[in-house]
């Protein structure tokens, strides 16, 4: 029997586990899916906005995979902590596939970035998604009349939308009660979503963009002069279909004043150069006007503009984080690999593999993880005869406990779900996420632990 550990219970990890048990070339594969958190589903639980129920429903298909009797979920197990090194994992399993994603946000690298009121979008998403590592003091939105979101991808659209959503629209979701209350008391009336390049280079999807223009009591506005700076504005026929659709949506947005409503202002060709403060808090963002450089990029023009704001969220991408004991390419933010096989000094390391963002970088959509996982699994299966000859510890869960880990089983996860349903019922809502480690662990271990 080939015993495999998959590290990470997000889509990449679950698709890897599914491919391992779904193949027939190597019978008898058993998979333990380990995750640092007590809960499965990764960014589907902790990254998808609470008002996007259709995408969140993907949890149902991930659940089906994790309920397979050949797969065991082991939550609250952190590789790199309590002696659980990659080397130790290889003593417990014939093979280990790391699907740990890209957990760190990119910084702007401008003065004032650490002022009070300046955050990464990742921090904001973690807060409204009830991630147990989220800022314990939350976000003070009461004094922020305007916000600036730097970025032009779907994460930027998500945080922009959540900042102007009406509380009654969020109440039926699983958003934690503290975040719901803070957003209900928010003073944010205007959100400037700012990109350093033009609309043809924006990374958001048309569906997400179009949704911004349909929010109740909110006006979506655009500066037409900035749209016209894009070389493809007059003739978008050469653009990819998605970019053409985005440009069509933006052409339909008005310019001008918010007329008393909340407003989302889409801005282009502005590069942040400094976050300005007053009494230690964010007061404005200074931008340099950019222009197309004729080679697909932009250059500075030496002209500047300041946008007053009390809140700044940067949404300019993610980076992989080194895992102690694994090789890491700092320039790419990935683990070096060949078709998913981890490379140590350029040579494949027997039994070690990667899939997902830590393999290819933070690119693609959720579905992109399927072919990525299949490639890695194909490499692992080709190596299976040699891997199966390795001696491994007979009882990995007992070994994890001996190191001081207390794994949360699938039964423990179901207990968390029941506790969140009870929490929501007490608030007159549907299921509401438990936002802290103590609550999650307490709920998980109220069910029967792993035998």
Image: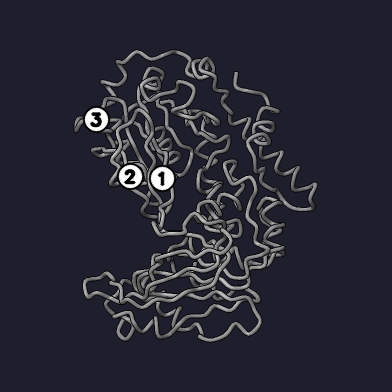
User: Residue at image x 53%, y 54%?
Assistant: 48
Q: Earlier in the sequence, mark 1 or mark 2?
A: 1
Instruction: Report how far apart the C-alphas of labels 3 and 2 lie in the structure.
Output: 16 Å
Give coordinates of residue 406: x percent, y percent: 58, 23
Q: Are marks 1 and 2 in contact (CB under 8 Å)?
A: yes
Residue 333's tag is: 2
Could you tell me residue 3's position as x and y percent? 40, 23
Quarter holding residue 302: bottom left
Q: Secondary structure at mark 2?
A: loop
Tag 3 near tag 2, CB within 8 Å: no
In the image, 301 versus 313, the foreground residue is 301
- The mark that comes first in sequence, 1 or 3, is 1
**Residue picked out by circle 3:** 344
Q: Residue 438, how many percent across, how many down?
A: 66, 34
Q: Sequence-wise, which precedes: disc 3 or disc 2? A: 2
Report how far apart the C-alphas of labels 1 and 3 lie in the structure.
20 Å
Q: Which residue is mark 1?
A: 102
At x 44%, y 23%, the residue is: 84
Question: Label 1: few (<14), some or many (≥20) within 10 Å?
Answer: many
Q: Secondary structure at mark 1?
A: loop
């Amino acid at each position: 029997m080939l015993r495999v550990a998959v590290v990470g219970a997000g889509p990449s990890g679950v698709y890897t586990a599914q491919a391992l048990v779904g193949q027939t070339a190597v019978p008898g594969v058993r998979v333990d899916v380990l995750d640092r958190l007590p809960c499965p589903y990764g960014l589907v639980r902790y990254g998808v906005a609470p008002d996007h129920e259709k995408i969140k429903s993907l949890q149902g298909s991930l659940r089906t995979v994790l309920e397979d009797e050949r797969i065991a979920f082991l939550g609250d197990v952190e590789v790199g902590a309590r002696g659980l090194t990659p080397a130790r994992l290889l003593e417990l399993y014939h093979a280990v596939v790391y699907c740990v994603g890209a957990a760190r946000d990119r910084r702007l690298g401008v003065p004032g970035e650490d002022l009070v009121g300046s955050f990464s979008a990742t921090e904001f998403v973690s807060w409204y998604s009830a991630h147990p590592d989220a800022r314990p003091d939350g976000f003070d939105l009461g004094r922020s009349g305007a916000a600036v979101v730097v970025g032009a991808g779907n994460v930027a659209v998500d945080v922009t939308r959540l900042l102007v959503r009406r509380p009654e629209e969020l109440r039926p979701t699983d958003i934690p009660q503290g975040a719901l209350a803070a957003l209900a008391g928010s003073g944010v009336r205007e959100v400037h979503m700012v990109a350093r390049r033009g609309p043809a280079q924006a990374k958001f999807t048309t569906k997400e963009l179009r949704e911004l223009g349909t929010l109740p009591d909110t006006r979506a506005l655009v500066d037409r002069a900035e749209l016209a700076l894009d070389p493809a504005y007059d003739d978008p026929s050469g653009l990819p279909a998605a970019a053409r659709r985005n440009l069509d949506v933006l052409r339909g947005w008005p310019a001008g004043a918010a007329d008393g409503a909340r407003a989302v202002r889409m801005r282009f060709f502005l590069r942040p150069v400094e976050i300005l403060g007053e009494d230690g808090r964010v007061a404005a963002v200074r931008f340099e006007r950019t222009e197309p450089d004729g080679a697909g990029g932009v250059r500075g023009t030496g002209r500047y503009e300041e946008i007053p704001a009390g809140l700044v969220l940067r949404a300019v991408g993610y980076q992989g984080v080194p895992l102690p004991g694994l090789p890491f390419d700092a320039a790419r933010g990935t683990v070096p690999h060949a078709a998913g096989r981890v490379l140590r000094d350029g040579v494949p390391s027997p039994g070690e593999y990667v899939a997902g963002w830590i393999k290819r970088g933070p690119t693609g959509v959720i579905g992109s993880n399927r072919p990525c996982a299949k490639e890695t699994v194909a490499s692992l299966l080709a190596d299976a005869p040699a891997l199966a000859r390795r001696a491994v510890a007979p009882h990995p869960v007992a070994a994890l406990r001996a190191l001081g880990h207390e794994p949360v089983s699938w039964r423990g996860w179901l207990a968390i779900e029941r506790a969140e349903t009870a929490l929501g019922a007490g608030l007159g809502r549907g299921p509401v996420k438990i936002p802290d480690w103590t609550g999650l662990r307490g709920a998980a271990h109220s069910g029967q632990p792993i035998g």
